Image (spheres, rainbow, N blue to C red):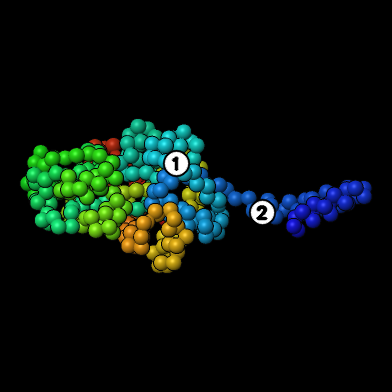
Amino acid sequence: MYLHYGFLHVWRWLLAGFSLPGLLLVGLWSLPLAAETLPALRLSVLQYGTAHWELDYIQREGLDRQQGFALELHPVANLPASRLALTSKTVDGAVADLLWVQSRYEAGAALLYVPFSSRIGEVVVAPDSSISRIADLAGKRIGVAGGPDSKGWILLQRVAAGQGLDLAASSEIQYAAPPLLSEALRRGRLDAVVTYWHFAARLQAEGSARTLMPLSDLLVELSLADQLPVLGYVFRDDWGRQNRELVDRFAAALRQAKQALTNNPDAWESVRALMRARDDRTFAALQSGFVAGTPPALDDERIASLQQLLVLTGTAPERVMPSSLFYREHP
Protein backbone atom coordinates (compact mmCIF):
# COMPACT_ATOMS: atom_id res chain seq x y z
CA MET A 1 0.00 0.00 0.00
CA TYR A 2 2.83 2.41 0.95
CA LEU A 3 4.78 1.65 -2.21
CA HIS A 4 1.68 2.31 -4.30
CA TYR A 5 1.09 5.59 -2.49
CA GLY A 6 4.71 6.57 -3.12
CA PHE A 7 4.42 6.10 -6.85
CA LEU A 8 1.18 8.12 -6.88
CA HIS A 9 2.97 10.88 -5.05
CA VAL A 10 5.83 10.87 -7.59
CA TRP A 11 3.30 10.91 -10.43
CA ARG A 12 1.62 14.01 -8.95
CA TRP A 13 4.99 15.78 -8.83
CA LEU A 14 5.59 14.96 -12.47
CA LEU A 15 2.10 16.14 -13.48
CA ALA A 16 2.72 19.37 -11.62
CA GLY A 17 5.82 19.94 -13.71
CA PHE A 18 8.35 19.32 -10.94
CA SER A 19 10.38 16.84 -12.98
CA LEU A 20 13.63 17.12 -11.03
CA PRO A 21 12.11 16.48 -7.57
CA GLY A 22 10.09 13.70 -9.15
CA LEU A 23 13.19 12.05 -10.52
CA LEU A 24 14.89 12.38 -7.15
CA LEU A 25 11.96 10.72 -5.45
CA VAL A 26 11.99 7.89 -7.97
CA GLY A 27 15.65 7.39 -7.16
CA LEU A 28 14.94 7.35 -3.44
CA TRP A 29 12.18 4.77 -3.89
CA SER A 30 14.52 2.51 -5.86
CA LEU A 31 17.23 2.41 -3.19
CA PRO A 32 15.62 -0.15 -0.84
CA LEU A 33 14.85 -2.42 -3.78
CA ALA A 34 18.47 -2.32 -4.95
CA ALA A 35 19.68 -2.99 -1.42
CA GLU A 36 17.63 -6.19 -1.32
CA THR A 37 19.18 -7.59 -4.50
CA LEU A 38 21.22 -10.64 -3.47
CA PRO A 39 23.36 -13.04 -5.49
CA ALA A 40 21.36 -16.16 -6.38
CA LEU A 41 22.55 -19.71 -5.84
CA ARG A 42 20.64 -22.20 -8.01
CA LEU A 43 20.55 -25.78 -6.75
CA SER A 44 19.00 -28.85 -8.34
CA VAL A 45 17.40 -31.07 -5.72
CA LEU A 46 15.41 -34.31 -5.77
CA GLN A 47 11.87 -33.32 -4.87
CA TYR A 48 11.60 -35.99 -2.17
CA GLY A 49 15.30 -36.37 -1.44
CA THR A 50 16.71 -35.91 2.05
CA ALA A 51 18.76 -32.86 1.04
CA HIS A 52 15.50 -31.06 0.24
CA TRP A 53 14.69 -31.15 3.94
CA GLU A 54 17.54 -28.92 5.04
CA LEU A 55 17.41 -26.74 1.92
CA ASP A 56 13.73 -26.09 2.48
CA TYR A 57 14.50 -25.18 6.09
CA ILE A 58 17.14 -22.71 4.91
CA GLN A 59 14.61 -21.01 2.67
CA ARG A 60 11.76 -20.99 5.20
CA GLU A 61 13.90 -19.54 7.96
CA GLY A 62 15.66 -17.06 5.68
CA LEU A 63 19.11 -18.41 6.53
CA ASP A 64 20.21 -17.78 2.97
CA ARG A 65 19.32 -14.09 3.18
CA GLN A 66 20.97 -13.82 6.59
CA GLN A 67 24.15 -15.03 4.90
CA GLY A 68 23.77 -12.63 1.99
CA PHE A 69 22.47 -14.77 -0.88
CA ALA A 70 19.18 -16.02 -2.29
CA LEU A 71 18.79 -19.80 -2.53
CA GLU A 72 16.83 -20.95 -5.58
CA LEU A 73 15.73 -24.59 -5.60
CA HIS A 74 15.02 -26.46 -8.82
CA PRO A 75 13.22 -29.69 -7.83
CA VAL A 76 13.61 -32.66 -10.18
CA ALA A 77 12.01 -36.08 -10.22
CA ASN A 78 15.10 -38.27 -10.42
CA LEU A 79 18.88 -38.39 -10.16
CA PRO A 80 19.66 -38.34 -13.92
CA ALA A 81 17.63 -35.13 -14.26
CA SER A 82 19.58 -33.54 -11.41
CA ARG A 83 22.91 -34.49 -12.97
CA LEU A 84 21.81 -33.18 -16.35
CA ALA A 85 20.79 -29.85 -14.81
CA LEU A 86 24.28 -29.51 -13.35
CA THR A 87 26.26 -30.57 -16.41
CA SER A 88 24.13 -28.41 -18.73
CA LYS A 89 24.71 -25.40 -16.44
CA THR A 90 20.99 -24.95 -15.84
CA VAL A 91 21.89 -24.80 -12.14
CA ASP A 92 25.02 -23.92 -10.20
CA GLY A 93 25.07 -27.02 -8.02
CA ALA A 94 23.40 -30.29 -7.07
CA VAL A 95 23.64 -33.17 -4.60
CA ALA A 96 25.86 -36.02 -5.73
CA ASP A 97 27.49 -39.24 -4.60
CA LEU A 98 31.25 -39.20 -4.05
CA LEU A 99 31.81 -41.97 -6.62
CA TRP A 100 29.98 -39.99 -9.32
CA VAL A 101 32.05 -36.91 -8.51
CA GLN A 102 35.18 -39.03 -8.92
CA SER A 103 33.95 -40.32 -12.28
CA ARG A 104 33.37 -36.75 -13.45
CA TYR A 105 36.88 -35.82 -12.39
CA GLU A 106 38.33 -38.69 -14.40
CA ALA A 107 36.26 -37.52 -17.38
CA GLY A 108 37.85 -34.08 -17.14
CA ALA A 109 34.95 -32.28 -15.41
CA ALA A 110 36.20 -31.42 -11.91
CA LEU A 111 33.63 -30.60 -9.22
CA LEU A 112 34.01 -28.85 -5.87
CA TYR A 113 32.64 -31.15 -3.15
CA VAL A 114 30.87 -29.61 -0.12
CA PRO A 115 29.96 -32.25 2.55
CA PHE A 116 26.28 -33.07 2.97
CA SER A 117 25.79 -36.47 4.66
CA SER A 118 27.76 -39.42 5.98
CA ARG A 119 24.89 -41.89 5.61
CA ILE A 120 26.00 -44.67 3.24
CA GLY A 121 23.08 -46.96 3.96
CA GLU A 122 22.31 -50.06 5.98
CA VAL A 123 22.12 -53.82 5.73
CA VAL A 124 18.68 -54.85 6.96
CA VAL A 125 17.10 -58.24 7.59
CA ALA A 126 13.67 -59.46 8.68
CA PRO A 127 12.89 -58.84 12.38
CA ASP A 128 12.91 -62.57 13.18
CA SER A 129 15.94 -63.40 11.01
CA SER A 130 18.72 -65.54 12.47
CA ILE A 131 21.32 -63.50 10.59
CA SER A 132 23.47 -61.68 13.12
CA ARG A 133 26.84 -61.08 11.41
CA ILE A 134 28.41 -60.76 7.98
CA ALA A 135 29.41 -64.43 7.88
CA ASP A 136 25.74 -65.39 8.17
CA LEU A 137 25.05 -63.80 4.79
CA ALA A 138 26.78 -66.67 2.98
CA GLY A 139 24.29 -68.59 0.85
CA LYS A 140 21.51 -66.08 1.48
CA ARG A 141 19.35 -64.07 -0.95
CA ILE A 142 20.71 -60.52 -0.84
CA GLY A 143 19.13 -57.50 -2.49
CA VAL A 144 21.37 -54.57 -3.40
CA ALA A 145 20.15 -51.06 -4.15
CA GLY A 146 22.17 -49.03 -6.60
CA GLY A 147 23.56 -51.90 -8.66
CA PRO A 148 26.89 -53.74 -8.54
CA ASP A 149 28.84 -50.46 -8.34
CA SER A 150 27.07 -49.32 -5.16
CA LYS A 151 29.77 -48.18 -2.74
CA GLY A 152 28.01 -49.81 0.22
CA TRP A 153 27.93 -53.15 -1.56
CA ILE A 154 31.57 -52.81 -2.62
CA LEU A 155 32.63 -52.03 0.95
CA LEU A 156 30.58 -54.90 2.35
CA GLN A 157 32.26 -57.31 -0.05
CA ARG A 158 35.70 -56.01 0.92
CA VAL A 159 35.07 -56.50 4.61
CA ALA A 160 33.57 -59.96 3.94
CA ALA A 161 36.63 -60.86 1.86
CA GLY A 162 38.80 -59.98 4.84
CA GLN A 163 36.86 -62.63 6.74
CA GLY A 164 37.44 -65.18 3.99
CA LEU A 165 33.96 -64.84 2.44
CA ASP A 166 33.16 -64.14 -1.22
CA LEU A 167 29.65 -62.77 -0.93
CA ALA A 168 29.04 -62.37 -4.65
CA ALA A 169 29.98 -65.99 -5.35
CA SER A 170 28.42 -67.62 -2.30
CA SER A 171 25.08 -65.77 -2.25
CA GLU A 172 22.17 -65.07 -4.58
CA ILE A 173 22.39 -61.37 -5.45
CA GLN A 174 19.53 -59.29 -6.82
CA TYR A 175 19.94 -55.70 -7.94
CA ALA A 176 16.84 -53.50 -7.97
CA ALA A 177 15.39 -50.13 -6.97
CA PRO A 178 15.05 -49.61 -3.19
CA PRO A 179 11.21 -49.71 -3.10
CA LEU A 180 11.19 -53.07 -4.89
CA LEU A 181 13.79 -54.48 -2.52
CA SER A 182 11.81 -53.25 0.49
CA GLU A 183 8.71 -55.04 -0.77
CA ALA A 184 10.68 -58.22 -1.48
CA LEU A 185 11.99 -58.23 2.09
CA ARG A 186 8.49 -57.73 3.47
CA ARG A 187 7.25 -60.72 1.47
CA GLY A 188 10.14 -62.93 2.54
CA ARG A 189 11.63 -63.16 -0.95
CA LEU A 190 14.97 -61.78 0.25
CA ASP A 191 16.97 -62.60 3.36
CA ALA A 192 18.86 -59.31 3.52
CA VAL A 193 18.88 -55.96 1.74
CA VAL A 194 21.73 -53.50 1.27
CA THR A 195 19.79 -50.25 0.89
CA TYR A 196 19.78 -46.51 1.42
CA TRP A 197 19.36 -45.36 5.00
CA HIS A 198 15.95 -43.68 4.63
CA PHE A 199 14.43 -46.81 3.08
CA ALA A 200 15.88 -48.81 5.96
CA ALA A 201 14.40 -46.32 8.44
CA ARG A 202 10.93 -46.71 6.96
CA LEU A 203 11.17 -50.51 7.07
CA GLN A 204 12.25 -50.45 10.69
CA ALA A 205 9.58 -47.95 11.70
CA GLU A 206 6.84 -50.20 10.31
CA GLY A 207 8.36 -53.27 11.98
CA SER A 208 9.33 -54.99 8.72
CA ALA A 209 13.09 -55.03 9.30
CA ARG A 210 15.92 -54.64 11.76
CA THR A 211 19.41 -53.32 11.10
CA LEU A 212 22.16 -55.89 10.75
CA MET A 213 24.70 -53.09 10.46
CA PRO A 214 25.00 -49.51 9.29
CA LEU A 215 27.28 -49.50 6.26
CA SER A 216 29.24 -46.66 7.86
CA ASP A 217 30.56 -49.23 10.36
CA LEU A 218 32.48 -50.77 7.46
CA LEU A 219 34.68 -47.68 7.29
CA VAL A 220 36.10 -48.44 10.71
CA GLU A 221 36.65 -52.07 9.66
CA LEU A 222 38.71 -50.73 6.74
CA SER A 223 40.74 -48.39 8.99
CA LEU A 224 39.13 -45.23 7.64
CA ALA A 225 37.79 -42.26 9.57
CA ASP A 226 34.17 -42.59 10.62
CA GLN A 227 31.34 -40.26 9.58
CA LEU A 228 32.87 -39.58 6.17
CA PRO A 229 30.64 -37.41 3.94
CA VAL A 230 29.84 -39.79 1.11
CA LEU A 231 27.22 -37.38 -0.27
CA GLY A 232 27.91 -33.76 -1.05
CA TYR A 233 26.70 -30.59 -2.67
CA VAL A 234 28.77 -30.21 -5.82
CA PHE A 235 29.61 -27.23 -8.00
CA ARG A 236 31.59 -27.01 -11.21
CA ASP A 237 35.14 -26.26 -10.10
CA ASP A 238 35.59 -23.28 -12.41
CA TRP A 239 32.31 -21.79 -11.19
CA GLY A 240 33.30 -22.50 -7.58
CA ARG A 241 36.60 -20.66 -7.93
CA GLN A 242 34.85 -17.66 -9.43
CA ASN A 243 32.14 -17.67 -6.75
CA ARG A 244 34.05 -18.78 -3.69
CA GLU A 245 32.41 -16.21 -1.42
CA LEU A 246 28.96 -17.42 -2.47
CA VAL A 247 29.96 -21.03 -1.74
CA ASP A 248 31.23 -19.92 1.68
CA ARG A 249 27.92 -18.22 2.41
CA PHE A 250 26.04 -21.34 1.37
CA ALA A 251 28.25 -23.50 3.62
CA ALA A 252 27.54 -21.15 6.53
CA ALA A 253 23.78 -21.41 5.96
CA LEU A 254 24.09 -25.19 5.80
CA ARG A 255 25.91 -25.21 9.12
CA GLN A 256 23.16 -23.11 10.70
CA ALA A 257 20.45 -25.42 9.33
CA LYS A 258 22.18 -28.58 10.50
CA GLN A 259 22.69 -27.14 13.96
CA ALA A 260 19.02 -26.16 14.21
CA LEU A 261 17.76 -29.53 12.96
CA THR A 262 20.09 -31.30 15.40
CA ASN A 263 19.35 -29.23 18.49
CA ASN A 264 15.74 -28.14 18.01
CA PRO A 265 13.16 -30.90 17.38
CA ASP A 266 10.50 -28.28 16.65
CA ALA A 267 12.48 -27.17 13.62
CA TRP A 268 11.41 -30.37 11.86
CA GLU A 269 7.74 -29.49 11.78
CA SER A 270 8.24 -27.08 8.88
CA VAL A 271 9.73 -29.81 6.65
CA ARG A 272 7.59 -32.73 7.77
CA ALA A 273 5.42 -32.65 4.64
CA LEU A 274 8.51 -33.20 2.46
CA MET A 275 9.45 -36.32 4.45
CA ARG A 276 6.27 -38.18 3.53
CA ALA A 277 6.23 -39.90 6.92
CA ARG A 278 3.06 -41.95 7.28
CA ASP A 279 3.11 -41.78 11.08
CA ASP A 280 4.99 -40.35 14.04
CA ARG A 281 7.20 -43.41 14.33
CA THR A 282 8.40 -43.08 10.74
CA PHE A 283 8.85 -39.34 11.20
CA ALA A 284 11.02 -39.92 14.29
CA ALA A 285 13.11 -42.57 12.49
CA LEU A 286 13.77 -40.28 9.54
CA GLN A 287 14.56 -37.35 11.80
CA SER A 288 17.08 -39.24 13.92
CA GLY A 289 18.61 -40.89 10.86
CA PHE A 290 19.17 -37.57 9.15
CA VAL A 291 20.77 -36.02 12.23
CA ALA A 292 23.03 -39.05 12.66
CA GLY A 293 24.40 -38.39 9.18
CA THR A 294 25.66 -34.89 9.93
CA PRO A 295 29.38 -35.04 9.09
CA PRO A 296 32.18 -33.22 10.90
CA ALA A 297 34.12 -30.58 8.98
CA LEU A 298 36.83 -31.82 6.65
CA ASP A 299 40.49 -31.71 7.59
CA ASP A 300 43.62 -33.34 6.13
CA GLU A 301 42.97 -36.69 7.82
CA ARG A 302 39.36 -36.91 6.75
CA ILE A 303 40.13 -35.87 3.17
CA ALA A 304 42.83 -38.54 3.04
CA SER A 305 40.26 -41.10 4.23
CA LEU A 306 37.84 -40.01 1.49
CA GLN A 307 40.58 -40.44 -1.08
CA GLN A 308 41.42 -43.86 0.32
CA LEU A 309 37.72 -44.75 0.17
CA LEU A 310 37.80 -43.97 -3.53
CA VAL A 311 40.77 -46.30 -3.96
CA LEU A 312 38.98 -49.08 -2.06
CA THR A 313 35.98 -48.72 -4.34
CA GLY A 314 38.04 -49.12 -7.50
CA THR A 315 39.79 -45.86 -8.37
CA ALA A 316 43.46 -46.04 -9.34
CA PRO A 317 45.50 -44.12 -6.72
CA GLU A 318 47.05 -41.82 -9.30
CA ARG A 319 43.60 -40.79 -10.61
CA VAL A 320 41.94 -39.87 -7.32
CA MET A 321 40.48 -36.36 -7.18
CA PRO A 322 42.87 -33.96 -5.38
CA SER A 323 42.35 -32.56 -1.91
CA SER A 324 41.73 -29.08 -3.39
CA LEU A 325 38.33 -30.28 -4.64
CA PHE A 326 37.14 -31.07 -1.10
CA TYR A 327 35.64 -28.00 0.53
CA ARG A 328 37.03 -26.87 3.86
CA GLU A 329 35.20 -24.48 6.11
CA HIS A 330 36.98 -21.35 7.23
CA PRO A 331 38.20 -21.48 10.84
Q: Please state which of residues 8 and 222 is positioned toward the viewer in this rendering.
A: 8
Q: Amino acid at mark 2?
A: Ala
Residue at the farthest right position: 16
* Quarter of the C terminus within the rendering: bottom left
Q: Dot 2, crowdedness within 10 Å: few (<14), some or many (≥20)?
A: few
**Of pointers 2 and 1, the one earlier in the residue sequence:** 2
Q: Please indicate, yes or no, whether residue 300 appears anywhere in the rendered image.
A: no
* Figure check: 258 above or below 96: below
Task: Name the residue located 49 percent from the left edge and 40 percent from the top edge.
Answer: 91
Where is residue 236 shown, x and y percent of the image? 44, 39
**Cα separation between marks 2 and 1:** 32 Å
> What residue is shown at x 11% (from left), y 42% (from top)?
171
**Figure check: 268 above or below 312:** below
Question: Where's residue 188, x and y in %?
Answer: 17, 48
Where is residue 113? Give x, y as percent: 39, 46
Determine which of the numbered discs, if any, sits on residue 160 in the image: none
- The residue at 9%/51% (across/down) is 136
The residue indicated by pointer 1 is: 76
Q: Quadrant of the N terminus?
A: bottom right
Q: Tag 2, which secondary structure?
A: helix
Q: Which residue is mark 2?
A: 35
